Image (cartoon, rainbow, N blue to C red):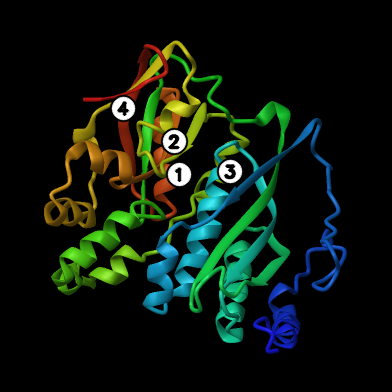
């Protein structure tokens, strides 16, 4: 009887991954092949260290990435989204573990995934310490890959950014997204199916497929140096649910965030999606970031300092709203 899972191929693939996980980080105490990863915590400089934990996956964007042979992009999507969710607490990302689940293992594709995930981690100062590769025939179709990853971050308890210090009169600063990021791809795929001519569209000189598969932007490098200054009261990563269902998560119970939508710099791809799909304003706002991928809440007196700092990283950044009395709601004007 023929066995559907090729254990020898899986073992050979894992051996060839070793170089991608090489690191000079002395806190990593063992290498690929162990039953689990060992990471030694360096707690110097922390009075009361708190671990920050998060698991993420890049959603149905994975289908398009595999279909158009852009698997590297979706690896950055996964890691950048993951780290954004971690660092909005004011933390430093330390280590990432990933999982690759597929219907049939293609050694070259799996190696591309691991190599890119490791690169994406290194760019944000953390390390991919290992994970899992699982071939599951008849559970997933051949050519289907499901990616997921988890991160461990660390922050001193006194430096946690959780929105508890937000006060009336603070401003809401929007930091530009790079595009759709990792949300709304079910709708995009439906549009592509019902309106195949959309693939011929050009947005700012780029092909439609390249624009919608632009990797999720990571904000860590642009904001990390602001953490020690203690001038940020709250941060929200704007993902599925839009600004209304993400920014509200950090608001105190007695405050609202009043957002002036006219201040938004909407990216052209969102206008195209709305026009072709005849999507309502409400659905667009709930499904997409609409050009703002991160919001920062801070005292108005710090706004120029924050904006100028983030702009120095070639990211657009501008005030989009204000904190007012209310009941933990995001109100769009």
The residue where tag 2 is placed is 305
CA distance for labels 4 and 1 = 19 Å
The Cα–Cα distance between marks 2 and 1, rounded to whole angstroms, is 6 Å
Furthest toward the front, the residue is: 1
Question: Residue 108's spot in the image, x, y percent?
Answer: 58, 86
Does 127 appear above or below 113?
above
**Disc 2, disc 1: CB below 8 Å?**
yes
Q: Which residue occupies 53% across, 29% down?
A: 231
Mark 4 vs mark 2, CA separation in Å: 17 Å
Q: Position of residue 281 (x, y in %)?
A: 18, 39
Circle 4 residue: 321
Could you say which disc has been placed on residue 87 in the image?
A: 3
- Is 116 located above or below residue 320 in the figure? below
Classify mark 2: residues with Cα within 10 Å, few (<14), some (14-19) or many (20+). few
Q: Secondary structure at mark 3?
A: helix
Q: Residue at x 52, y 66 (%)?
A: 75
Task: Determine contact: label 4, label 2, CB under 8 Å.
Answer: no
Left or right: 274 in relation to 296: left
Q: Position of residue 194 (x, y in %)?
A: 17, 64
How crowded is the residue under tag 3: few (<14 C-alpha within 10 Å), some, or many (20+)?
Answer: many
Question: Seen in the image, is 185 located left or right of residue 234?
Answer: left
Task: Identify residue for label 1.
Answer: 309
Q: Secondary structure at mark 4?
A: strand
């Amino acid at each position: 009887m023929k066995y559907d899972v090729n254990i020898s191929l899986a073992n050979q693939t894992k051996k060839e991954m070793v170089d991608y996980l090489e690191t000079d980080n002395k806190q990593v105490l063992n290498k690929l092949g162990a039953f689990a990863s060992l990471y030694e915590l360096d707690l110097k400089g922390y009075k009361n260290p708190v671990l920050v934990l998060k698991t993420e996956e890049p959603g149905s964007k994975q289908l398009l990435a595999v279909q158009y042979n852009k698997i590297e992009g979706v690896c950055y999507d996964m890691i950048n989204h993951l780290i954004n969710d971690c660092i909005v607490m004011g933390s430093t990302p330390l280590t990432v573990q990933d999982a690759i689940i597929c219907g049939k293992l293609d050694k070259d594709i799996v190696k591309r995934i691991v190599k890119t995930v490791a690169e994406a981690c290194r760019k944000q100062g953390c390390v991919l310490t290992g994970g899992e590769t699982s071939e599951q025939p008849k559970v997933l179709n051949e050519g289907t890959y499901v990616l997921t990853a988890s991160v461990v971050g660390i922050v001193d308890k006194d430096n946690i950014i959780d929105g508890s210090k937000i006060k009336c009169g603070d401003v809401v600063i929007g930091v530009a997204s790079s595009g759709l990021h990792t949300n709304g791809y079910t709708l995009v795929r439906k549009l592509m199916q019902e309106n195949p001519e959309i693939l011929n569209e050009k947005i700012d000189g780029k092909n439609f497929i390249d624009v919608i598969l632009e990797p999720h932007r990571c904000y860590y490098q642009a904001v990390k140096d602001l953490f020690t200054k203690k001038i940020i009261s709250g941060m929200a990563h704007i993902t599925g649910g839009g600004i209304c269902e993400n920014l509200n998560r950090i608001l105190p119970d007695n405050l609202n965030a009043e957002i002036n939508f006219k201040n938004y710099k909407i990216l052209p791809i969102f206008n195209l999606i709305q026009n072709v799909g005849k999507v309502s304003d409400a659905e667009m706002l709930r499904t997409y970031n609409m050009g703002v991928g991160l919001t920062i809440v801070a005292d108005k007196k710090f706004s120029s300092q924050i904006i100028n700092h983030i702009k120095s990283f070639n990211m657009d950044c501008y005030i989009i709203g204000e904190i007012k009395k209310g009941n933990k709601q995001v109100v769009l004007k």
